[in-house]
Amino acid sequence: MFASASFRIRPEAGLALRRPSPKLVPLFLTALISACVTPKSLELPELSDWENRQDVLVGVDEWEFVGRIGVSAGDEGFNGQLRWRQDGAVFRARINGPLGIGTVFINGDRRKITVTDRNGAVTELHDAEVELRQMYGWTIPVTSLRFWALGIPDPGSPAETEFGEDGQLSKLRQQNWEVDITQYREGGGQLMPRRLTAVNDDVKVRLAIDNWVFR
């Protein structure tokens, strides 16, 4: 047990202590928390044209984004949050879904991909898209999403591309997926995808990226 003590601060003569307005406290706390948890991004080189964009972004080794993800696959699906971090060939994806899904971690590199469920059980995936569907009833394009999120095709396989009037990639078809990028926003000083949708048969993945950080 700790002994309790009472202290009273006596204001200096001529000074009045004012209690801050209750309306200002939540705003101050929100600003303070945002400043603490939002890391600052490095500026990317200028992405002057399509070829330059692909060359630059394929070579960017360390970055992450935070956003919202919605997945529907037949009768299954969920809406949640997605944090994706890329460190060279290694990626770490954390999906926060509803109570039935909980938090799922998908980690991988060029050699293997693993999924860790909400109970901490780790499973190595040999065919990530197929096995995620078998395990959870839904799937995401694990190996290619890191490139599509940057607004470029996966360089590991052929792709068909279409561009909008602004010259930015608006649609691509790759590995049986059709990807639509419907909105861009600033990230690292350049235009990066803000909203994209990827569809493969009865699987639909919607992604809204709220924040980009390049290191």
Image (cartoon, rainbow, N blue to C red):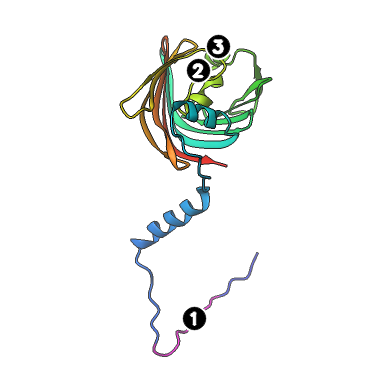
Check residue 96 in the rendering and tell me which mark sits there, or answer none.
Answer: none
- Left or right: 72 with respect to 140? left
Principal secondary structure, stretch drawn in magenta: loop
Closer to viewer: mark 1 or mark 3: 3
**Amino acid type of the residue that numbered disc 1 sits on in the rendered structure:** Ile
- Left or right: 129 with respect to 160? right
**Amino acid type of the residue that numbered disc 2 sits on in the rendered structure:** Thr
User: Does the CB distance between marks 1 and 3 fall below 8 Å?
Assistant: no
Instruction: Specify start and end residues of the magenta stretch as a single range.
Output: 6-14
Q: What residue does disc 1 label? A: 9
Q: Label 1's element?
A: loop
* Label 1, residues with CA under 10 Å away: few <14, some 14-19, many ≥20: few
Farthest residue to the bottom: give it: 13
| Residue 185 occupies quadrant | top left
Residue 24 visible in the current orientation: yes
Image position of 201 with respect to 193: above or below:
above
Q: Confirm whether the magenta stretch covers residue 13.
A: yes
Q: Earlier in the sequence, mark 1 or mark 2?
A: 1
Q: Whole-Å distance between the Cαs marked 2 and 3?
A: 7 Å
Q: Whole-Å distance between the Cαs marked 1 and 3?
A: 66 Å
Q: Label 2's element?
A: loop
User: Does the CB distance between marks 2 and 3 fall below 8 Å?
Assistant: yes
Q: What residue does disc 2 label? A: 139
Q: What residue does disc 3 label? A: 130
Q: Label 3's element?
A: helix
Quadrant location, the N terminus: bottom right
Q: Earlier in the sequence, mark 2 or mark 3?
A: 3
Residue 99 visible in the current orientation: no
Q: Confirm whether the magenta stretch covers residue 108.
A: no
Image position of 19 with respect to 54: above or below:
below
Please provide percent x and percent y for residue 53: 48, 30
* Label 2, residues with CA under 10 Å away: few <14, some 14-19, many ≥20: many
